[in-house]
């Protein structure tokens, strides 16, 4: 346990020793262990986009063992996936890396912004997971049901010592497409996840666009063109940095953009990245090189 990790755990004042132990498992794992920074591999894209769109570009990715091994060999903080992939490698990789069981998922054919609950807290216990993961869609017509679902699942997880990670992705309702990544909307979405009791909050990097007319006055007079400043505002919105905030890698992009995102997250006080397609869709050696450089950036080595 490092002083940095101890200070983070101290901010979770109501949590029992089991939750803090599992949070520490993630914070102390891999090459970023003890730094307070995280780099997590999420592989739920098979549900969201389909197998060919997710893995045909790098066919090794059809095998769940590939992702476990990639996360371990890259020295990542955790591996997040739905029930099936975690079950497929649970015995082979037991104890080698903290896992996050994604409890809800959707598919690319759905016409509503909603997800089905596809796994349970009991599954997370059975598989030795350090955390559960859950997606909410602030702005959607189904957000209130999603809030009630994660309220119950998070309470159950905390009672048995498991950490909660909330993916908070604004979409639907009155939001424009541009508004899904707006600064005011992203900060609001991150704040909602904190309000719902998340230990780790996952959001997308926001743009400088301001979506809500009602919020525009609060953002006037400040230059939001710098991405690090936008990251800082999202972190501020999560109880002034009392909650861990990691940022999605987003759509496929070039390595230079990914490295710049990491530098901005570091400069803005974010806790790290959760990068899926931008890592596992690359050939293994390229993915290891990419992830290794992101780790060096978060360690302040370049």
Image (cartoon, helix red, strand yellow):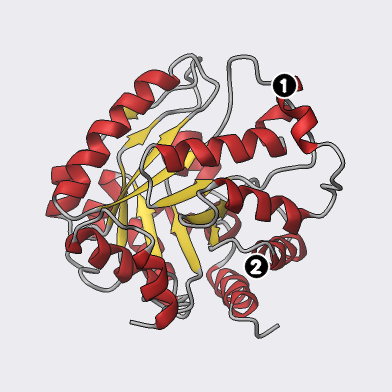
Residue under circle 2? 266
Residue under circle 1? 214
Q: Earlier in the sequence, mark 2 or mark 1?
A: 1
The 10 Å Cα crowd at callout 1, few under 14, some 14 to 19, many 20 or more, is few
Residue 252 visible in the picture: no
Residue at the image point whose x is 53% and y is 56% from the top: 246
Quarter-of-image position of residue 213? top right
Locate residue 85 relative to residue 123 in the image: left or right: right
Number of marks in picture: 2
Locate residue 205 relative to residue 80 in the image: left or right: right
Image quadrant in which the C terminus is located: bottom right
Residue at the image point whose x is 18% and y is 64% from the top: 17
Q: Are the residues flagged by discs 2 and 1 in contact, CB closer than 8 Å? A: no
Tag on residue 76?
Answer: none
Relative vertical location of residue 300 with respect to residue 105 in this rendering, above or below: below
Alpha-carbon distance for marks 2 and 1? 30 Å
Residue at the image point whose x is 26% and y is 59% from the top: 130
Disc 2, SS: helix
Image quadrant in which the N terminus is located: bottom left
Coordinates of residue 84 in the picture (x, y in percent): 26, 45
Coordinates of residue 301 in the picture (x, y in percent): 65, 85
Locate residue 226 relative to residue 35 in the image: left or right: right
Residue 199 visible in the picture: yes
Residue at the image point whose x is 47% and y is 19% from the top: 110
Quarter-of-image position of residue 10? bottom left
Coordinates of residue 127 in the picture (x, y in percent): 17, 56
Quarter-of-image position of residue 27? bottom left
The 10 Å Cα crowd at callout 2, few under 14, some 14 to 19, many 20 or more, is many
Relative vertical location of residue 163 with respect to residue 10 in this rendering, above or below: above
């Amino acid at each position: 346990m490092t002083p940095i990790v101890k200070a983070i755990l101290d901010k979770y004042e109501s949590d029992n020793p089991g939750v803090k132990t599992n949070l520490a498992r993630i914070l102390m794992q891999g090459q970023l262990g003890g730094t307070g920074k995280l780099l997590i591999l999420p592989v739920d894209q098979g549900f969201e986009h389909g197998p060919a769109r997710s893995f045909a570009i790098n066919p090794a990715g059809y095998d769940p063992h590939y992702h476990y091994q990639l996360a371990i060999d890259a020295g990542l903080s955790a591996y997040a996936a739905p029930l099936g992939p975690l079950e497929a490698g649970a015995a082979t990789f037991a104890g080698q890396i903290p896992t996050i069981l994604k409890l809800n998922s959707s598919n690319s054919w759905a016409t509503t912004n909603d997800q089905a609950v596809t796994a349970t807290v009991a599954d997370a216990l059975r598989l030795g997971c350090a955390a559960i993961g859950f997606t909410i869609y602030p702005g959607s017509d189904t957000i209130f049901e999603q809030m009630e679902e994660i309220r119950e699942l998070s309470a159950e997880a905390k009672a048995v010592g498991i950490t909660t990670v909330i993916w908070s992705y604004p979409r639907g309702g009155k939001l424009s497409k541009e508004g899904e990544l707006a600064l005011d909307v992203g900060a609001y979405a991150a704040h909602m996840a904190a309000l719902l009791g998340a230990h780790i909050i996952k959001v997308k990097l926001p743009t400088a666009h301001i979506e809500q007319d009602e919020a525009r006055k609060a953002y006037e007079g400040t230059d939001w063109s710098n991405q690090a400043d936008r990251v800082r505002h999202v972190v501020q919105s999560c109880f002034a940095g009392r909650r861990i905030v990691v940022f999605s890698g987003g759509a496929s992009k070039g390595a230079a953009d990914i490295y710049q995102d990491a530098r901005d997250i570091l400069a803005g006080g974010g806790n790290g990245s959760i990068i899926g397609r931008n890592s596992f869709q690359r050939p293994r050696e390229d993915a290891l090189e990419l992830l290794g450089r992101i780790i060096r950036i978060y360690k302040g080595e370049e």
